[in-house]
Image (spheres, rainbow, N blue to C red):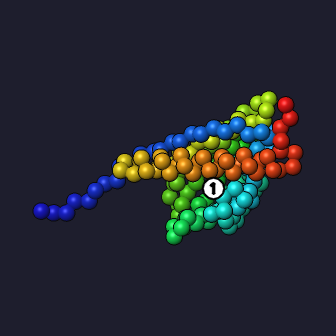
């Protein structure tokens, strides 16, 4: 009987979470659109290089270490509407690795930040990738909240 290879059926996982941040949209925008902030937001990330200042066409490379695993992610900013919307596409070793989208909604007490992560995955790993994205996105939004409130001028006034 010949060996058959299992084909990985590609699908996409999309996870969205929101967080109310007691900081102005300008400060939250600075935190999410500045590549150098990634080192501060997640200690597993190291900014290897950056071109541009977070505007459309800006690119940066992050080295991410989690335990023994390591990934080198290349980001390209596809959309940047200051204090409103930021979208970046990622690739890993030249292969599409997903999209991250941040939407900022001004509120009386600060900013509602809605973040969506979309990643390709196989049918068999869909649940695992979804759970991982949910857990990591919660940590990511907490870090953005913490750094936005500690940035000078970051606390919103009611």
Q: Is residue 152 above or below residue 83?
A: below
Residue at x 70%, y 61% (from the top left corner): 39
Work out whether residue 114 or residue 35 is closer to the camera in this orientation and state it. Answer: 114
Q: Quadrant of residue 106?
A: top right
Assign a secondary structure to mark 1: strand
User: From the image, which quarter does the N terminus lie in?
Assistant: bottom left
Q: Quadrant of the C terminus?
A: top right
The residue labelled by disc 1 is 75
**Residue 8: % across, % down:** 34, 53
- Residue 90 visible in the picture: yes
Above or below: residue 72 compared with residue 82 = below
- Residue 31 visible, this orientation: no
- Picture residue at 42% right of the left edge, 47% below the top: 127
How many numbered dots are placed on residues in this image? 1
Please, which residue is most extreme toward the left here? Answer: 1
Looking at the image, which residue is at 77% across and 39% down? 22
The answer to which image quadrant residue 70 occupies is: bottom right
Left or right: 45 in relation to 157: left
* Circle 1 Cα neighbour tier, 10 Å, few/some/many (<14 / 14–19 / ≥20): many
Residue pictured at 69% horizontal, 56% vertical? 41
Q: Is residue 138 left or right of residue 21?
A: left
Give the x, y percent position of residue 78: 65, 46
State the residue in front, 109 or 29: 109
Between 45 and 52, the residue placed more toward the observer is: 45
């Amino acid at each position: 009987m010949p060996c058959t290879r299992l084909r990985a059926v590609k699908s996409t996982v999309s996870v969205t979470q929101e967080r109310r941040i007691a900081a102005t949209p300008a400060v939250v925008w600075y935190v999410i659109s500045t590549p150098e902030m990634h080192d501060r937001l997640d200690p597993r990330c190291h900014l290897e290089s950056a071109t541009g200042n977070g505007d459309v066409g800006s690119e940066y490379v992050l080295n991410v270490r989690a335990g023994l695993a390591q990934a080198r992610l290349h980001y390209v900013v596809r959309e940047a509407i200051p204090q409103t919307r930021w979208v970046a596409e990622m690739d890993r070793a030249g292969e599409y690795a997903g999209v991250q989208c941040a939407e900022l909604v001004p509120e009386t007490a600060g900013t509602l930040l809605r973040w969506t992560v979309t990643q390709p995955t196989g049918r068999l790993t869909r649940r695992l990738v979804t759970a991982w994205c949910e857990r990591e996105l919660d940590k990511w939004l907490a870090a953005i909240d913490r750094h936005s409130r500690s940035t000078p001028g970051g606390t919103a006034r009611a």
